[in-house]
């Protein structure tokens, strides 16, 4: 018996809550909880998302989300450090 599906969330080190969603190609992305005016990712359902191609964004009626890592200062610093 599989019950209701809930969005999978976790807390980032910066204090923000991230919502995890999986793309159609199987990549897990941490999204910001709130949609963003410059977001690129559409939630298909609670756990599945889709990167909307640039040419489709203007016509897209759904709210679009950004990955949390694109806005998170801690994630940016961590990625930078791991490259050095
Ligand atoms: Zn963060």
Image (cartoon, rainbow, N blue to C red):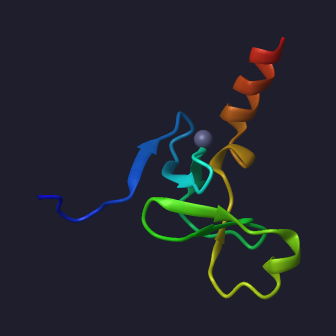
The image shows residue 27, relative to residue 65, as above or below, that is: above
Residue 82: horizontal and vertical position, in percent?
75, 16
Residue 64: horizontal and vertical position, in percent?
67, 72
Residue placed most toward the observer, 63 or 76? 63
The image shows residue 3, relative to residue 58, as above or below, that is: above
Image quarter in which the C terminus is found? top right
Residue 61: horizontal and vertical position, in percent?
67, 88
- Quadrant for ligand 1 reads top right
Residue at 45% from the left image edge and 59% from the top image edge: 47
Image quarter in which the N terminus is found? bottom left
Q: In this view, does 82 lie to the left or right of 48?
A: right
Which residue is most to the top? 84
Residue placed most toward the observer, 15 or 33? 33
Residue at 80% from the left image edge and 78% from the top image edge: 57
Residue placed most toward the observer, 55 or 79? 55
Which residue is most to the left? 1
Residue at 38% from the left image edge and 58% from the top image edge: 7
Looking at the rendered structure, the number of numbered marks drawn on it comes to: 0
Residue 32: horizontal and vertical position, in percent?
58, 57
Q: In this view, does 47 lie to the left or right of 73?
A: left
Residue placed most toward the observer, 4 or 33? 4
Image quadrant where residue 40 sits: bottom right
The image shows residue 45, relative to residue 24, as above or below, that is: below
Residue at 83% from the left image edge and 84% from the top image edge: 58
Which residue is most to the right? 55
Image quadrant where residue 39 sits: bottom right
């Amino acid at each position: 018996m599989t019950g209701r599906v809930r969005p999978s969330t976790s807390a980032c080190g910066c204090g923000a809550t991230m919502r995890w969603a999986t793309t159609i190609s199987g990549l897990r992305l941490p999204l910001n909880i709130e949609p963003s005016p410059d977001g690129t990712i559409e939630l298909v359902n609670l756990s599945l998302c889709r990167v909307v191609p640039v040419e489709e964004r203007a016509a897209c009626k759904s709210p679009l989300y950004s990955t949390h890592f694109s806005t998170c200062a801690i994630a940016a610093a961590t990625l930078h450090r791991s490259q050095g």
